[in-house]
Amino acid sequence: MTAENRSELSPWAAESTRIREWFASNRHQMSGNGVWFSGGEPNTLDPELFSGARVRILIVRLSEYKDVAAGITHSYLYQMASSVDGCFVDMAFMPPERDEKLMIAAGIPLLTGTNTKFPAAAFDVVAISNSVLQELINLPALLHFSGLPLSRSAREAAASPLVILGGSNSSVHSILHGQTGDGAAEGLVDAVIMGDGERVLAEALSLVRDNRDCARPELLKMM
């Protein structure tokens, strides 16, 4: 890892430490003692690998952990993404209502990697896995309270992660591709991934990994 990369990640490392310390001090107030936010699940990558990765992806579920833990979707996506050479993967879930209030009050980003405790803004890609249309109502607040702008142009200006959407019905969610209310003719996500997830997700992550120096619009055209 170069000195430049270490410098780039330094503020995020400090934020990760702050989040870890907050969690250790406050998990007793959280739903189920904060088990959903504890991370360390089997077959997940060592958080120490985050700093040396060539592309970092945060897989986001728009529902609470207790509602999706029994399914295989996020673990399947995790394994697909981690199979890409040089890719580091973490997961984030919608906090329970009680925990959401605690996190907002403390300035903890709602979308934070459960394993690394790095905020969404520290990743290269925020990949949203949408199962049902009703989940999308949670997206604007999750982005906002994670420090991610709600429009494509604002994310580009802020050098925020790419926000991509996938899922069996993602292509029909036109609500995400229209006006955001801030005057920009663009939606809440930067790109929509359609087709076989195992192939398309790996291709998208490989493109991001191999074209980090490309301007954002050019990279999106490739996708």
Image (cartoon, rainbow, N blue to C red):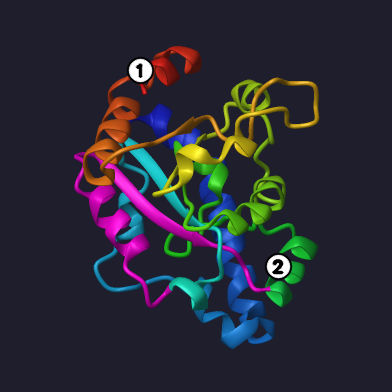
Residue interval drawn in magenta: 69-96
Quarter of the C terminus within the rendering: top left
Q: State the residue position of label 1.
A: 222
Q: Residue at x 60, y 69 (%)?
A: 21
- Asked where in the image residue 212 lies, by quadrant, the reply is top left
Q: Residue at x 28, y 47 (%)?
A: 81
Q: Name the side, left or right, on which 84 lies relative to 20.
A: left
Give the amino acid type for the residue marked by disc 1 in the picture: Met
Mark 2 lies on a secondary structure that is: helix
**Distance between the Cα atoms at labels 1 and 2?**
36 Å
- Label 2 crowd bin: few (<14), some (14–19), many (20+), radius 10 Å: some
Decide if residue 127 is in sight here: no
Give the amino acid type for the residue marked by disc 2 in the picture: Glu
Mark 1 / mark 2, whichever is N-terminal:
2
Give the residue furthest to the front.
172
**Up-down: is 207 above or below 37?**
above
* Callout 1–callout 2 Cβ contact below 8 Å: no
Q: State the residue position of label 2.
A: 100
